[in-house]
């Protein structure tokens, strides 16, 4: 990762823990942080755990990236940091955000969980522009564990390392054993004696906690958990932060590290498959689709957000063909959490439109998905016109 990014990298047991370490280091509690409302709710709760007030950004409806030109001047004046999402691997305009953050004297943090291998329009890798960036090895690398916190200033390593270590919980045999079972559980192995244990593994790992796209907010309990301002911390927010990955702060055992190392060695092959599948899917449905390109190359998107009229019907039709669609973030966080917990976007419409119409499909399954989509009555839709078009950032 250091070679890829050209900057210092610190292993973390999950992306969310890396983000928490970064927020605590760069963003004093009580501050306000601009973030994307079309985002994993877990990230929202990490921001709250760090004692920050989320401020939802306006988005470009074409690809769900932050619409910098639509952020009101008054919003900038109250911010203490900006967090990008790089949704599905489409880069947020980090070079321009960086310039704006520098002008305001505030840090930029890049969440590159979906964007390992993506590049900005200026050719820099996603994650190499902000003061800090975080990566998840559960996405492209498929490790189901692990992440990186990367940062520009190598002198910070000892401090960040000890912040991480203070947050770690000891490795337990049970957690390693469950980790070993997770691939079987996720593959949905049927008819094996492993099945019951695998199911238990998924439940204990927290991967079976969502009945709907968003986890239940439980507003009253959340308000109580946030009471000891300025920074409630991970312990109090644990029931929300751990969803999908209960061992997010467990020190990795030998098995996790061995498997992760093996998967990371194959990352370039994985990225090549994501890039090829992205190119294939962008040709499968007529435009308009997410640009999916930067610096003239197809990005190795984590998911390709096809923009379709009836997203839920498309999901159901794909499910009948045993193609599961995940990583949906609908409704946006301001509609989900309300003004008690976040500043709403000044322009929620484009984000809500994108969240409702994006069908994020796995480019590694392009060979099955493209013909399945062609056989379905899937209607592509065009994003609503944005007054603040971003010509010049990504070629329009
Ligand atoms: C945008 C985004 N950031 C961060 C994360 C957290 O990654 P991890 O599960 O490695 O903590 C996720 C998880 O899906 C995500 O979607």
Image: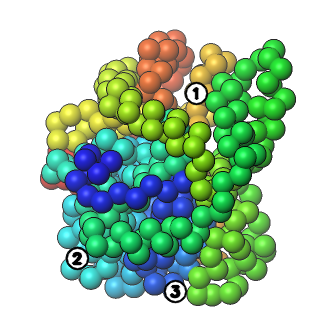
Q: Is residue 51 visible?
A: yes
Left or right of 133, for residue 227: right
Disc number at residue 337? none
**Disc 1 designates what residue?**
314
Q: CA distance from mark 1 to mark 3?
A: 42 Å
Mark 2 crowdedness (10 Å alpha carbons): few <14, some 14-19, many ≥20: few
The residue that disc 2 covers is 102
Residue found at the far front of this picture: 254
| Residue 182: x %, y % from top left | 67, 34
Q: Residue at x 33, y 73 (%)?
A: 156
The CA distance from mark 2 to mark 1 is 43 Å
Lower position in the chain sequence, tag 3 or tag 2: 3
Residue drawn at (36%, 44%), measured in percent from left and top? 116
Q: Quadrant of residue 325?
A: top right
Q: Is residue 274 visible?
A: no
The label nearer to you, 2 versus 1, is 2
- Callout 3 touching callout 2 (CB < 8 Å): no
Residue 30: which numbered mark, if any?
A: 3
**Viewer-side residue, 105 vs 264:** 264
């Amino acid at each position: 990762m250091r070679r890829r990014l050209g900057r210092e990298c610190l292993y973390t047991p999950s992306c969310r823990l890396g983000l928490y370490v970064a927020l605590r280091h760069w963003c004093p509690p009580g501050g306000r942080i601009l973030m994307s409302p079309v985002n994993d709710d877990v990230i929202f709760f990490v921001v709250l755990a760090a004692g920050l007030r989320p401020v939802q950004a306006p988005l470009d409806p074409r690809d769900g990236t932050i619409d910098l030109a639509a952020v009101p001047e008054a919003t900038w004046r109250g911010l203490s940091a900006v967090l990008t999402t790089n949704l599905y691997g489409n880069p947020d305009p980090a070079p321009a955000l960086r310039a704006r953050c520098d002008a305001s004297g505030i840090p930029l943090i890049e969440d590159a969980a979906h964007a390992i291998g993506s590049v900005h329009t200026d050719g820099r890798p996603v994650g190499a522009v902000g003061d800090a960036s975080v990566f998840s090895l559960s996405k492209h690398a498929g490790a189901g564990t692990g992440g990186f916190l990367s940062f520009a200033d190598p002198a910070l390593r000892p401090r960040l390392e000890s912040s991480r270590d203070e947050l770690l919980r000891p490795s337990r045999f049970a957690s390693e054993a469950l980790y070993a079972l997770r691939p079987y559980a996720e593959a949905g192995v049927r008819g094996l004696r492993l099945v019951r244990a695998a199911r238990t593994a998924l439940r204990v790992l927290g991967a079976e906690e969502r009945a709907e796209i968003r986890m239940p907010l439980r507003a009253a309990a959340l308000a109580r958990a946030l009471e000891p301002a300025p920074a409630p911390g991970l312990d109090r927010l644990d029931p929300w932060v751990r969803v999908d990955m209960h061992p997010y702060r467990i020190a990795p055992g030998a098995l996790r590290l061995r498997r992760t190392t093996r998967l990371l060695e194959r990352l370039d092959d994985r990225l090549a498959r994501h890039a090829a599948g992205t190119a294939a899917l962008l040709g499968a449905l007529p435009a308009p689709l997410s640009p999916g390109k930067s610096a003239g190359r197809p990005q190795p998107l984590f998911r390709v957000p096809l923009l379709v009229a009836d997203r839920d019907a498309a999901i159901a039709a794909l499910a009948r063909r045993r193609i599961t669609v995940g990583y949906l973030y609908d409704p946006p966080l301001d509609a989900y959490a309300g003004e008690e917990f976040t500043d709403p976007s000044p322009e929620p419409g484009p984000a809500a439109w994108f969240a409702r119409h994006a069908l994020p499909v796995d480019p590694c399954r392009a060979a099955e998905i493209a013909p399945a989509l062609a056989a379905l009555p899937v209607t592509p839709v065009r994003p609503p016109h944005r007054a603040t078009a971003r010509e010049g950032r990504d070629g329009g």
